[in-house]
């Protein structure tokens, strides 16, 4: 079993936590856009409270460990590895609870080129424990607004993890699908599950719009979030996102394997 000390060292070495690749400038820009209600960073969350930039800086300092000083506007941003470890412990506990009651679970990611393996291994473990891992609305079209205008994608499942791809494309070059922050894919998936009169997820696991979109609809949702994704932490603070784990979400995919082992061991789901 991977020890907490070893995982902490891994987080720092790979820059999953500690000094991360996200810059302070990028984080502050996201906080300003969130405060202005920009849907590119609200990720499907409709905040109940008014969040000014200073409020978001204070929240992210508490949840992630970034600097609480609004005057610090340059340099690399940071994630406190102790907060990441605590988040992973809570994340594992939530998965263990779901496994214990064999709850239907839906996995989805807006970072398929980085996080697909992490979620897929969790999906395999929960399925082996008796949880239905749902794959509703396979192939359904999703129109997503991008910086290039509205583009149509298909909702697909790779190893039972939902993601979106441009029509006519297949996995290639190690990139299984498109990067997106949109909550529309999870809405399409949930609508598909309801229309099919099949089970609805009791837990959604993912990132970006998958977590915020599900949480906004009142579904238990947990996932990973970077320091420039304030929506998940706002959702957690307001009680609509069940758990957001602070971690860099864009390092090499193999760097997340120790996190998978740690979570599965703590959740008693190792195979």
Image: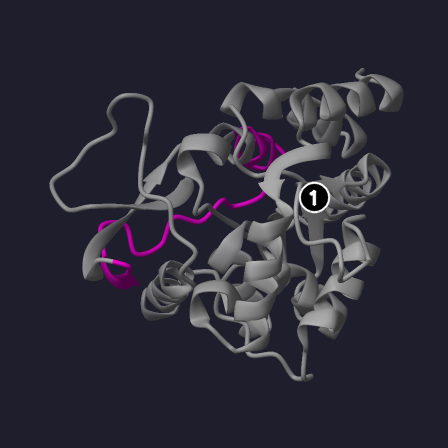
User: How many numbered marks, from 0 up?
Assistant: 1
Residue name at image x 37 percent, y 60 percent: 189
Residue name at image x 81 percent, y 25 percent: 8
Image quadrant assignment for residue 130? top right
Q: Is residue 207 left or right of residue 139?
A: right
User: Was residue 123 drawn as part of the magenta stretch in this picture?
Assistant: yes
Residue hosting label 1? 95
Packing grade of label 1 (10 A; few <14, some 14-19, many >=20) is many
Residue nearer the viewer, 134 or 252: 252
Residue 246 spot, x, y in % from top left: 70, 45
Residue name at image x 56 percent, y 73 percent: 216
Q: Magenta stretch: give its range.
A: 121-147
Residue 54 spot, x, y in % from top left: 74, 71
Q: Is residue 113 above or below residue 179?
A: above
Q: Is residue 72 left or right of residue 271?
A: right
Q: Is residue 56 left or right of residue 144?
A: right
Check the image and tell me how it is coloured: one colour
Residue 50 spot, x, y in % from top left: 67, 84
Image quadrant assignment for residue 125? top right
Q: Is residue 222 visible?
A: yes
In the image as oriented, which residue stretches furthest toward the left?
A: 168
Residue nearer the viewer, 153 or 20: 20
Q: Is residue 219 above or below residue 37?
A: above
Residue name at image x 82 percent, y 16 percent: 6
Image quadrant assignment for residue 61? bottom right
């Amino acid at each position: 079993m991977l020890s907490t000390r070893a995982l902490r060292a891994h987080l720092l070495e790979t820059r999953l936590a500690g000094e991360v690749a996200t810059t302070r400038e990028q984080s502050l820009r996201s906080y300003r856009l969130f405060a202005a209600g920009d849907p590119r960073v609200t990720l499907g969350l409709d905040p109940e409270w008014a969040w000014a930039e200073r409020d978001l800086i204070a929240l992210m300092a508490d949840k992630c460990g970034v600097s609480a000083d609004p005057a610090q506007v340059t340099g690399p941003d940071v994630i406190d590895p102790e907060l990441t470890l605590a988040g992973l412990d809570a994340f594992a506990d939530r998965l263990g609870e779901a496994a214990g009651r064999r709850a239907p679970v839906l996995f989805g990611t807006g970072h398929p080129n980085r996080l697909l393996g992490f979620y897929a291994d969790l999906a395999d473990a929960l399925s082996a424990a008796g949880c239905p891992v749902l794959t509703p609305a396979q192939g359904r079209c999703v129109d997503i607004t991008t910086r290039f205008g509205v583009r149509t994608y298909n909702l697909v499942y790779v190893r039972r993890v939902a993601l979106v791809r441009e029509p006519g494309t297949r996995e290639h070059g190690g990139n299984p699908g498109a990067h997106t922050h949109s909550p529309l894919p999870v809405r399409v998936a949930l609508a598909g599950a309801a229309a099919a009169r099949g089970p609805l997820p009791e837990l959604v696991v993912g990132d970006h719009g998958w977590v915020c979109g599900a949480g906004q609809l009142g579904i238990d949702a947990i996932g990973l979030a970077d320091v420039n994704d304030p929506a998940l932490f706002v959702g957690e603070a307001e009680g609509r996102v069940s758990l957001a784990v602070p971690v860099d979400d864009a390092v090499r995919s193999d760097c997340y394997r120790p996190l998978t082992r740690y979570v599965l061991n703590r959740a008693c789901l190792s195979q």
